[in-house]
Image (cartoon, helix red, strand yellow):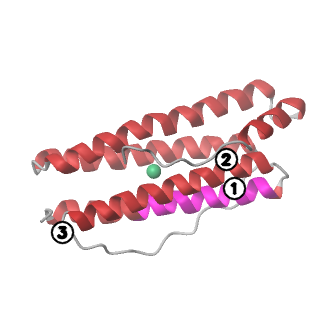
Amino acid sequence: MINARLEEVINKQINAELYSAYLYLSMSAYFESINLPGFANWMRVQFEEEQFHGLKFLKYLVERGGRVKLDAIEQPQFEWNNPLEVFEHTLEHERHVTALLNNIAEIAEVEKDRATRNLMVWFIDEQVEEEGSAEKIINELKMIGGEGHGMLMLDREFSTRVFTPPVNA
Ligand code: MG
């Protein structure tokens, strides 16, 4: 049986992951509205990835004998000024998620819950990739100044991204 404090923060994290999914779906719709279907695809893959994260936490809580309590998902932003702003928002959001995960890891340490601590290792490693890919795209967008040929190339590249669930998960 999982400790009550961990049960509470994991429930909150399920909501945070599903909010992330919702935010990226909203970003995907924004990209559709400005005729960047490749960027929209990239964000739809993010949407799938975040749903996967939410489910991973949910399954873990069930496995540990915890009770899943789903909460309302906050409305995400739906308007941005340009693609660069979207990815800056993404990076800022992922840094916030990293802080939430580090907090769960700390509680797991205090409560001496090794299984939860191990789960957090997987998630925190994943965050390195999440933040890294947002940073990379921000740099690319700055390099091409957000216009013309460069945007077309990036849009084509992003149209090939597909979601593949991690094998060890
Ligand atoms: Mg996530």
Instruction: Tell me the residue that label 2 is attached to.
Output: 42
Check disc 2 and report its element: helix, strand or loop.
helix
Tell me, yes or no, whether the highlighted magenta stretch contains residue 9: no
Tell me if I can see residue 127 in this picture: yes
Residue 20 part of the magenta-drawn span:
yes
- The residue located at (57%, 56%) in the rendering is 47
Which residue carries the number 3 mark? 65
Q: Which of the two labelled residues, at mark 2 and mark 1, occupies the earlier sequence position?
A: 1
Q: CA distance from mark 2 to mark 3?
A: 35 Å
Sequence-wise first label, 1 or 3: 1
Q: Earlier in the sequence, mark 2 or mark 3?
A: 2
Name the residue at 21% across, 69% down.
66
| Residue 55 picture quarter | bottom left
Which residue occupies the foreground of this view, 64 or 111?
Answer: 64
Q: Nearer the viewer, mark 2 or mark 1?
A: 2
| Disc 3 residue: CB within 8 Å of ligand 1 | no
* Residue pointed to by mark 1: 28
Snapshot quadrant of residue 127: top left
Q: Amino acid at mark 1?
A: Ser
* Residue 141 placement (x, y as % from top left): 73, 32
Report the magenta residues as a range.
15-32
Q: Disc 2, disc 1: CB below 8 Å?
A: yes
Q: Main secondary structure of the magenta part?
A: helix
Q: Is residue 111 left or right of residue 161?
A: left
